[in-house]
């Protein structure tokens, strides 16, 4: 079958036509991929950045983890799913038996497999996953939108971690797809004002279109801007870090008010020191992070918002390409793309 494969350590990946079709175990399903999306993580893996290497990718590997598709075959012990079911897929393949899994934190499973990193991914005609990783999609959700439930779910999780943002001022660092959906959700959840930080002018414009105050952090003193524009509180109530830039966390810690909240989503490629005494103790900031989505409450929340048309994700798809133009898709992410969809 056709697939995008990373064969060896180092930059690059290749489109092959002879990838072996997945063989099913009893608890697994075979999915005919209907739509797949390129994520920043795929670009990191393609470029072989440190943050991608930190996931210990298992090579050779079929890349990709954001997809929706149709169940084509099932292992003997699979229950609750049927042939022809349309599903989106959770990237964090959880064991269901470890302590986090048993206590409601399966997204942070001790034995986690990662689709498209340690487990063959979705940039292919077919992919296989444990049946427990499938999220059935109602007929009302098109395949291409279903393929975006994975990244958009990260944004929902970020808002869950932040707590109530109604009437709050919100700072969102990074206006990639996850940051843009965080902006949409913050507004939907009743934030009073949203400020977006982004260096890519196309993405900055998208944030502005959503109604955010758009700033290029290279051209503005962000903490000063926040203190000036939110003088009563002395900064923003909540800040989200979605860019993964290791330099931005100190800026956000400076930009939130005393007793404010910071949620980190992007994975910086290096350790970021935090002045605990100044920010966490004395300033009283609550610092939390997000890894993936919560199974399955984040997914259900997102579905409810999309199904009722409270949240529109369709505009995020800026480019549609056939699978063999994967490399073009990676290049587009550095330019004016938000989400690049791959048709297998
Ligand atoms: Zn587990």
Image: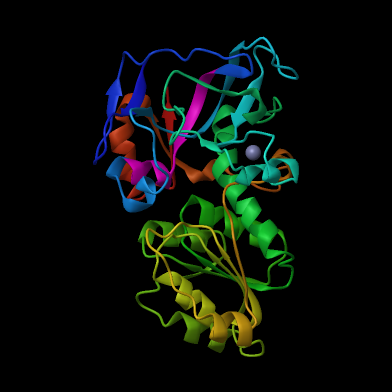
Q: Which residues are magenta?
A: 31-45
- The percent position of residue 125, horizontal first and vertical second, equals 44, 18
Question: Which residue is painted at 69% across and 73% down in the image?
Answer: 168
Ligand 1, by image quadrant, is top right
Instruction: Depth check: give the residue in front, 90 or 332.
Output: 90
Does residue 102 show up magenta in the picture? no
- The percent position of residue 94, horizontal first and vertical second, equals 62, 35
* Figure quadrant of residue 59: top left
Question: Which residue is painted at 60% across and 39% down in the image?
Answer: 149
Q: Is residue 317 left or right of residue 200?
A: right
Instruction: Depth check: give the residue in front, 36 or 275.
Output: 275
Instruction: Depth check: give the residue in front, 317 or 209.
Output: 317
Where is 103 relative to 342, above or below?
A: below
Total label count?
0
* Figure quadrant of residue 146: top right
Instruction: Depth check: give the residue in front, 196 or 2.
Output: 2
Quadrant of image for the C terminus: top left
Question: Which residue is painted at 53% across and 44% down in the image?
Answer: 315
* Figure quadrant of residue 248: bottom left
Q: Is residue 43 left or right of residue 75?
A: left
Q: Is residue 105 visible?
A: yes
Where is 96 relative to 152, above or below?
A: above
Does residue 33 show up magenta in the picture? yes
Quadrant of image for the N terminus: top left
Where is 121 relative to 186, above or below?
A: above
- The percent position of residue 264, horizontal first and vertical second, equals 54, 63
Q: Is residue 215 visible?
A: no
């Amino acid at each position: 079958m056709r697939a995008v494969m990373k064969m060896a350590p180092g930059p690059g990946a290749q489109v092959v036509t002879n990838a072996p079709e997945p063989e099913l175990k009893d608890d697994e399903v075979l999915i005919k991929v209907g739509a797949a999306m390129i994520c920043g993580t795929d670009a990191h893996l393609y470029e072989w950045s440190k943050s991608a290497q930190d996931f210990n990718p298992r090579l050779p590997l079929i890349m990709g983890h954001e997809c929706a598709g149709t169940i084509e075959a099932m292992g003997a012990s699979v229950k609750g799913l049927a042939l022809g079911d349309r599903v989106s897929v959770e990237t964090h393949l959880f064991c269901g038996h470890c302590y986090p899994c048993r206590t409601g934190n399966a997204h942070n499973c001790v034995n986690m497999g990662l689709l498209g990193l340690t487990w063959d991914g979705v940039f292919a005609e077919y992919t296989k996953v444990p049946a427990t990783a499938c999220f059935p999609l109602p007929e009302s959700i098109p395949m291409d939108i279903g393929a975006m439930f994975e990244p958009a779910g990260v944004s929902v999780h970020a808002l869950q971690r932040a707590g109530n943002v109604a009437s709050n001022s919100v700072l969102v660092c990074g206006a990639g797809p996850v940051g843009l959906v965080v902006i949409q959700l913050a507004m939907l959840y009743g934030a009073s004002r949203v400020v977006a930080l982004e260096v890519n002018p196309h993405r900055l414009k998208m944030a502005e279109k959503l109604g955010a105050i758009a700033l290029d952090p290279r051209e503005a003193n962000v903490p000063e801007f926040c203190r000036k524009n939110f003088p009563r509180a002395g900064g923003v109530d909540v800040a989200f870090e979605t860019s993964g830039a290791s330099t931005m966390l100190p800026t956000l810690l400076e930009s939130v008010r005393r007793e404010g909240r910071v949620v980190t989503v992007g994975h910086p490629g290096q350790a970021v020191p935090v002045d605990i005494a100044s920010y966490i103790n004395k300033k009283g900031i609550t610092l939390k992070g997000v890894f993936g989505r919560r199974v399955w409450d984040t997914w259900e929340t997102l579905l409810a918002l999309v199904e009722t048309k409270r949240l529109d994700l369709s505009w995020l798809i800026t480019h549609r390409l056939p699978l063999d133009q994967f490399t073009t898709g990676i290049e587009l992410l550095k330019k004016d793309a938000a989400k690049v969809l791959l048709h297998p």
